Amino acid sequence: MAEKQLQVVSGLRLWRWRNQAISDAIAHNISPAEVDWLLLEVAGLDRLSLRLESFKEQPEIQMALPLEDLEQLWHRRLNERLPVQYITGVTPWRKFKIAVSNAVLIPRPETEYLIDLAVAAATNSGAAPLLNSEHWADLGTGSGAIALGLADAFPKATIHAVDYSPEALQIARDNARNLGFDNQIKFYKGSWWEPLAARKGEFIGMVSNPPYIPTSTVTTLQPEVVNHEPHLALDGGIDGLDCIRQLIEISPQYLRPGGVWLIEMMAGQADTVQTLLQKQGSYSNIQIYADLAGIERFAVAYIK
């Protein structure tokens, strides 16, 4: 949180605030679990004391910001649909706690599967002995979540993370430093492969969660998304595939033979993406994977 000086509130007062906040959440069709998630972050409470409501007996609870400020932010959550992750400034992702702001897309749980697929795909490609010493690219890194996941999965690899937004890159750099990966992840400002032009043919893998929402669909998304998350990270053009087409076309120049190409996409795009990969001619063993909800969400291919 931005507020550094800890504030003190009584457990009883915080308990009353929590009860009211839960009632307001239900009335606004927001998950009441968000209230406790917020209190875990700003009040340092643990899940058990929240579940048992035992914190009510504490004479003093230290908070990262005054209760009045928390109340104002919570009203923004209710009335402006400000995502709770932007209120706390952090979100859980894999085993990390990642800093976020409205300069970056909030990393989604389903995107975590990209890292598992990267490990499986790279192993299946026969490149397993090279994994720990090779170069990977995370294109459109945003908060740096994918780069962090790759760095954790391949401890001796170098991860090259690219983003067009300087604000996003600053958050990604901060996350890498805070989580101890700043020596393993290199950051570049630019569009897709462009800043890596001097390293053509050097990469064993590319992972990307590019913008893939059709332009006309962006404005119909949940207000939490359309009103607060960066449209640069959402809008994929008329059919949502502008960025994916570019990644399909250009990536073979940068990936080694046997290298892994892996992206996240939107429901309903899998057949088109598979066809585009086939027509490009440089890819083999093209596979589509579903997320935990059964939606065809990920495409994996290998360079011939």
Image (cartoon, rainbow, N blue to C red):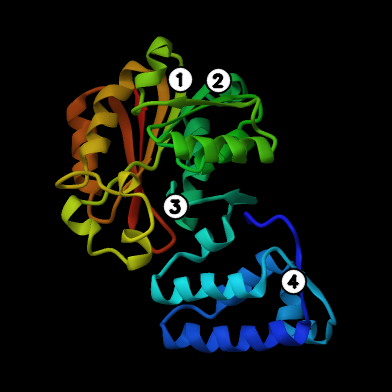
- On the image, numbered disc 3 is attached to which residue? 102
**N-terminal label among 1 and 3:** 3
Dots 2, 3 in contact, CB < 8 A: no
Check residue 203 in the rendering and tell me which mark sits there, or answer none.
1
* Quarter placement of the N terminus: bottom right
173, 281: nearer the viewer: 173
Q: CA distance from mark 2 to mark 3?
A: 32 Å
Q: What amino acid type should be assigned to the residue bearing mark 1?
A: Phe
Number of other residues with Cα within 10 Å of mark 1, as a class: few under 14, some 14 to 19, many 20 or more:
many
Q: Are marks 4 and 2 in contact (CB under 8 Å)?
A: no
Report the residue at 83% width, 77% height from top: 60
Secondary structure under tag 3 reads: loop
Looking at marks 4 and 3 on the same chain, the residue that comes earlier in the sequence is marked by: 4
Label whose residue precedes the other's in the sequence (2 or 3): 3
Mark 4 or mark 2, whichever is nearer to me: 4
- Estimate the x, y position of residue 82 in percent, counting from the top left: 44, 66
**Mark drawn on residue 134:** 2
What is the distance, in whole Å, between disc 2 and disc 1 at their CAs? 7 Å
Q: Are marks 4 and 1 in contact (CB under 8 Å)?
A: no
Which of pointers 2 and 3 indicates the residue nearer the eye? 3
Q: Amino acid at mark 2?
A: Glu
Callout 3 amino acid: Asn
Q: Mark 2 or mark 1, which has the lower sequence index? A: 2
Q: Could you tell me the amino acid type at mark 4? A: Leu
The CA span between labels 1 and 3 is 31 Å
Q: Which residue is mark 4?
A: 45
| Residue at 41% across, 10% down | 198
Circles 2 and 1 in contact, beta carbons < 8 Å: yes
Q: Is residue 254 above or below residue 119?
A: above
